[in-house]
Image (cartoon, rainbow, N blue to C red):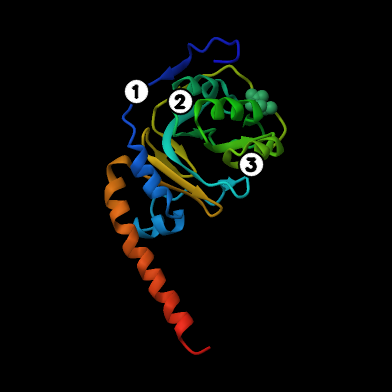
Amino acid sequence: MYINAPADNIAVYPEWPRPSRDIVQSLAAYPPALIGDVRKRMDMMSADIRCLTPGTRLAGTVLPIQTWEGDNLAIHRGLDEAKPGDVLVISGNGVTNRSVFGGILAEICLHKGVRGVIIDGAVRDVEEMNDMGIAVFARAVVPAGPSKNGPGYVGKPIACGNVVCNPGDVVIGDQDGIVVIPQSELTETLQALPGQENLERQIRSRITESAP
Ligand SMILES: O=C([O-])CC(=O)C(=O)O
Ligand SMILES: [Mg+2]
């Protein structure tokens, strides 16, 4: 950790398998809306979880973190477990009057190869994070900062934007929002996507080829 604080009350769950970089990259070529369509519109996060860094997209594997309301010790501890390609998926229990994430944590993320963060809670330092190029999705923005006392969990399944997120699941996000793909369903999801893309292409050609 880059802060001086005892973190013994943050429970860190054992290491989990992460999917291959290739399959995450292949899924990232498709927008969340299309991925949701082939997944029966399931496992899509609440509309309240918004992209706060316009123009950024997010794709990676879930590193789940549970914070105590208004506290971010678990995020600092969780970043010690981060691997390049991870996305921090954080439950702040939906609390919006204390931000649990900001520019300093964003800098640690980028240093560790974590290029995206999703928070069921609030953040601050949004202008700074926009300049950094990190993708940040959250429920709210507020300047009031967090405590750093814990407790919390790292690596245990959490709820974020109404969806259960397990360690190693894949999250894809754009300006529409976030879809979560369970690790066991990555291949079947990927295989179904070209067909759905083709269906949309056919509808578009019918539009362009028809008389106005
Ligand atoms: O103070 C905090 O822990 C949150 C924050 O603003 C930052 O990470 O820059
Ligand atoms: Mg800050």
Label 3 vs label 1, nearer the camera = 1
Task: Using the rendered view, name the quadrant where residue 150 is placed.
Answer: top right
> Where the N terminus falls, by quadrant?
top right
Labels 1 and 2 touching (C-beta < 8 A): no
Labels 2 and 3 touching (C-beta < 8 A): no
Nearer-the-camera pick, 79 or 5: 79
Distance from disc 2 to disc 3, alpha carbons, whole Å, reads: 24 Å
Classify residue 11 as left or right of residue 105.
Answer: left
Dot 2 beta carbon under 8 Å from ligand 1: no
For the point 64% across and 41% down, the residue is 140
Amino acid found under the numbered disc labelled 2:
Ala
The x, y position of residue 11, in whole percent, is: 43, 18
Residue at which label 2 appears: 82
Badge 3 element: strand
Amino acid found under the numbered disc labelled 1:
Glu
The x, y position of residue 190, in whole percent, is: 32, 52
Amino acid found under the numbered disc labelled 3:
Ala
* Mark 1 surroundings: few (<14), some (14-19) or many (≥20) residues within 10 A: few
Residue at which label 1 appears: 15
Q: Tell me which numbered mark, 3 or 1, is placed earlier along the sequence.
A: 1
The disc placed on residue 140 is 3
Distance from disc 1 to disc 2, alpha carbons, whole Å, reads: 10 Å
Residue 70 shows up from this direction: no
For the point 48% across and 28% down, the residue is 66
Task: Using the rendered view, name the quadrant where residue 129 is placed.
Answer: top right
Where ligand 2 lies, by image quadrant?
top right
Classify residue 56 as left or right of residue 45.
Answer: right
The x, y position of residue 149, in whole percent, is: 58, 16
